Image (cartoon, grey):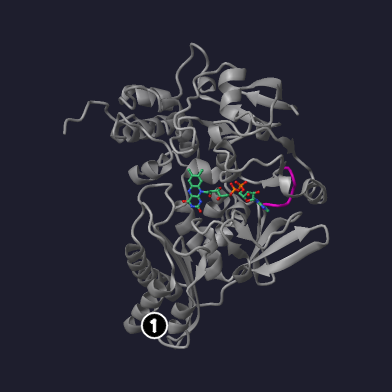
Amino acid sequence: MIAQSFQYESPGTLAEAIALLNQYGDEAKVLSGGHSLIPMMKLRFASPGYVIDINGIPGLSDIKEENGVVHIGALAREADLEHSALLAKYFPIFKDVTKLIADPQVRNMGTLGGNLAHGDAANDHPAVMIALGASVIITGADGEREVPIDEFFYGFYMTAIQQGEILTEIRLPVPAAGTGNAYHKLERKVGDYATSGVAVQLTIGSDGIVTAAGIGLTNVNPVPLRATRSEEALVGKPLTEENILLAAQYASEDCNPSADLRGSEDYKRHVTGVLVKRMIKKAAERAMAS
Amino acid sequence: MNKTINVTVNGAKHTLDVEPRLLLVHMIREVLSMTGTHIGCDTSSCGACTILLDGKSIKSCTVLAVQADGKSITTIEGLAPEGGPLHPLQEGFKENHGLHCGFCTPGMIMRCVELLEHNNNPTEEEIRWGISGNLCRCTGYNNIVKAVQWAGAKMRGEETPSTEPEFV
Ligand SMILES: Cc1cc2nc3c(=O)[nH]c(=O)nc-3n(C[C@H](O)[C@H](O)[C@H](O)COP(=O)(O)OP(=O)(O)OC[C@H]3O[C@@H](n4cnc5c(N)ncnc54)[C@H](O)[C@@H]3O)c2cc1C
């Protein structure tokens, strides 16, 4: 399968890339890892006239900690996230999620920025970002702006990124002591998109009271979903079996999955509840061990 | 508009004039006439087209040739010198019946080159996850796992496991 013809540009600076995006308008597409874009171009679901490859722009793939914030460059690959010692220290959830994204070859190419910018509720990182309370930096001709993850996903393949803009960085607050996080998705086989996926981050005080909870859901809603009622069922209370069950029940009620070859709506709601329960327990175990 | 790219393939430098939509796997097979890299699914699922791009295993059906500009490529043809000794993985697949029809083998081996480079003593589980992006429809994978373990032992300079067939 061959894509429709296009013009290829590989700018060496961010300013140049943004200028090209502004020049070519909605005919242009950014190329990061290419592992969502190129398949779509081969299938002719997307036929951009201009492809702006940002991989030649230096400094867009660093992972570093500064003033209580972990900064991840948009071009950090799945394989970088998988092997980063800094991320492993605060966010073992990255090991959980990367292992479940596609396969090693795809993970050598796919980037965190691309995974989010694609705006697909079936992708796994959006739910993780929701649980971790991330924000993203979007850079355009007028400079950069920081967008909280809850204001980033608009709809199917639609995000806060506007024409002429590039997602350049992801920011994660360094979690407080007593924090744990975890992700799991049910997949029919390696490389499949989630039947349902659940990301949880919990902070538990020394008195056993949950002081913060983030819960994000994959592929059970038109856009990546924050399970707000589930979070509220946990915060300010001890982590009892009863509260965990309530959080699971709320998530299965509040998501909005559609039936497809991965299962019926009911089945997906059920799986979501089961995963919420399990991931709360796993995150709590990690919080205790931290 | 065509683009001129410089790529090093199995140590040899090439300057090529390519259409941006040319896929890397087609560049390798059709422009450079190296047909060891196979096309299976053409949708980045099967791994038959796996090659090394700057030492990293990637699926060349989902990368554009222009993305390889300035980079170095290794294909199955570049793994062992012509007429020289085989790479331990090639030998391992041969000794352990790690292939039947052979279609997936070049991609499988190129993937495992990177796998063993990171960890030359992987567990069975690590090998199975490591080749999770490569489909084989003949072997049932067991002999592939053995082949990789065999190659790991050889690369570590240890005695290679027996290759007596296992009857189950
Ligand atoms: C076989 C296979 C299995 C997969 N399985 C999974 C899976 O299980 N879970 C999962 O989450 N994903 C999966 N994916 C998708 C994969 O993770 C993609 O790599 C990811 O969705 C997109 O990241 P990318 O860097 O490749 O982006 P690209 O493909 O380069 O870009 C995707 C889209 O985002 C835009 N874009 C990219 N980067 C930026 C940026 N910095 N700023 C603005 N716009 C940008 C592009 O223009 C394009 O529209 C799979 C892919 C394949 C091929």
Give residue A18's position: percent from left, percent from top: 79, 51
With respect to residue A204, does B143 lie above or below? above
Front-lying residue, A256 or A205:
A256
The chain letter for the residue carrying disc 1 is A
Residue kind at label 1, given as amino acid type: Leu
Is B79 displayed left or right of A252 in the figure?
right
The answer to if A57 sits in the magenta stretch is: yes
In this figure, what is the number of numbered marks? 1
Residue found at x 66% / y 32%: B68
- The segment highlighted magenta reads A56-61
Is A158 displayed left or right of A222 in the figure?
right
Give residue B148's position: percent from left, percent from top: 38, 33
Residue under label 1? A239
Q: Residue furthest top?
A: B83
The answer to if A78 sits in the magenta stretch is: no
With respect to residue A234, does B116 lie above or below? above
Determine the image quadrant of residue B129.
top left
Q: Residue furthest left?
A: B168
The quadrant of the picture occupied by the C terminus of chain B is: top left
The quadrant of the picture occupied by the N terminus of chain B is: top right
Is A77 displayed left or right of A205 in the figure?
right
Residue found at x 83% / y 61%: A142
Give residue B105's position: percent from left, percent from top: 41, 26
With respect to residue B30, does A245 lie above or below? below
Residue found at x 37% / y 83%: A243
With respect to residue A104, does A217 lie above or below? below
Give residue A211's position: percent from left, percent from top: 50, 84
Q: Secondary structure at mark 1?
A: loop
Specify the principal SS of the magenta part. loop
